[in-house]
Amino acid sequence: MIQKVLIANRGEIAVRIIRACREMGIETVAVYSEADKEALHTQLADEAICIGPAPSSDSYLSMERIISATLVSGADAIHPGFGFLSENSKFAQLCEKCGIIFIGPDSSVIASLGNKSVARNTMESAGVPVIPGSKEPVTEAESGEKIAGEIGYPVIIKAALGGGGKGMRVAKDASEFANSFHTAQQEAVNAFGDGTMYIEHFVQHPRHIEFQILADKYGNVIHLGERDCSIQRNHQKMIEESPCIALNDTLRKKMGEAAVKAAKAANYVNAGTIEFLLEKNGNFYFMEMNTRIQVEHPVTEWVTGIDLIKEQIRIADGRRLSYAQEDVKITGHAIECRINAENPKKNFRPSPGTITDMYLPGGKGVRIDAAIYSGYTVPPYYDSMLAKLIVHAKNRKEAVMKLRSALGEVIIEGIDTNVDYQYEILHHPDFVSGDIDIEFIEKMGKEKGE
């Protein structure tokens, strides 16, 4: 039985994990950088250990310091949250070598799915629909251009070891390819230290649909329905919802079965997400698998009633899944929006600083996942997300209205936020009707003359 969990993360996800552990009777250890000394997660955990100075490379990304903190504290498991080291196979392997339970999949699985080329080939062999693309990694623009011609333009060039929208460029035709390739490759080298690329056909005007899966070490794999994550800027999600109104029961069943098949093909254990691109004609393609808990997991928790963090811990503890596929029922509609410390009017410039006053909404069907408080100083070193506002109602129309109402109550003074921008999205006719795709934000910007 897991007795004590060290959370190798910060912010609202660290708070979320601490709360789940507390409800399970599990002790928690927070780690923090010098910039996060007064952070909420350090105050809520049973113990808190400083692991270095503010830069993440010297703290939250330092495997050695996190492992040392785990051993010193006597924690027997690490929950990596999302971001930072959550999808780092070397970190998971280090945990395994040190006899520490890593609350996530095995290091070998993270490594294979983290390489997009390998993951794609695995899914294709398993019969999961994939986008036409390069079979082998590409390192030179000349060979890449030949492959692009065979695939058919437009193509998207992606970092094989990338993520978060970095190392990614679209080439609409052969004349754009070389420049797009070199730009994406240089960005990949800067962000990930690796210039290996792969190329695939660029699916136009798709929705971004992801299926939440749970899998235990006994071969049981289920999905918990889908999330529509099409509202995104620069490949960074802004609003997520479940279920997706573009899916009928037949398509939902087909995609869910493909997600389970994908997880089984990867020998996956723990919580994960299979991400698809969905065309308007109903064709869908595997995009990637995220080997961690997602930022948007609360919408799935709302519509299924299943606590994903607790399930992660139970699975890591060697227990069987608490649910079979027939136990999963989707009830109502949930929508999440991310509240960030940024100024949309100034190209979404980050806005660190001290929160001088704050009020967050509540009420029936309203959930806030946050780690901020009045007087808290938002540091400039990390992701700008402050909080997640999630609502649940009996249908999408009521969920949209509830989210508008709740967002209208949010007060965060002292820094800039994207609250007004999110409010604007919620009133856009295309969002209200559900006629959205991953180019929605770009389209909205053009309408505003930006």
Image (cartoon, rainbow, N blue to C red):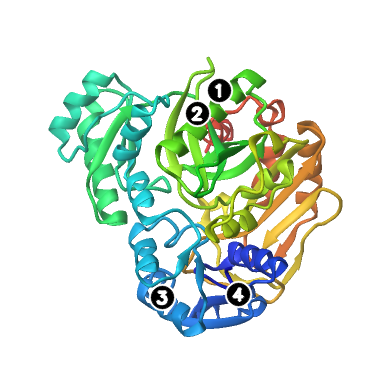
Question: Which residue is at the front of the view, 396 or 421?
Answer: 396
The residue wearing badge 1 is: 254
Instruction: State which tag comes first along the sequence, 2 or 3.
Output: 3
Please say if the residues under marks 2 and 3 sit with CB atoms less than 8 Å apart.
no
Disc 4: CA contacts within 10 A as few (<14), some (14-19) or many (>=20)? many
User: What secondary structure is marked by label 2?
Assistant: helix
The amino acid pointed to by label 1 is Lys
Q: Is residue 218 left or right of residue 179?
A: right
Q: Horizontal and vertical percent for residue 4? A: 58, 74
Which quadrant of the figure has residue 127?
A: top left
Please say if the residues under marks 4 and 2 sit with CB atoms less than 8 Å apart.
no
Please say if the residues under marks 2 and 1 sit with CB atoms less than 8 Å apart.
yes
Residue 28 tag number: 4
- Residue at the top extreme, as displayed: 281
The residue wearing badge 3 is: 67
Question: Which residue is at the front of the view, 263 or 321?
Answer: 321
The amino acid pointed to by label 2 is Ala
Instruction: State which tag comes first along the sequence, 3 or 4.
Output: 4
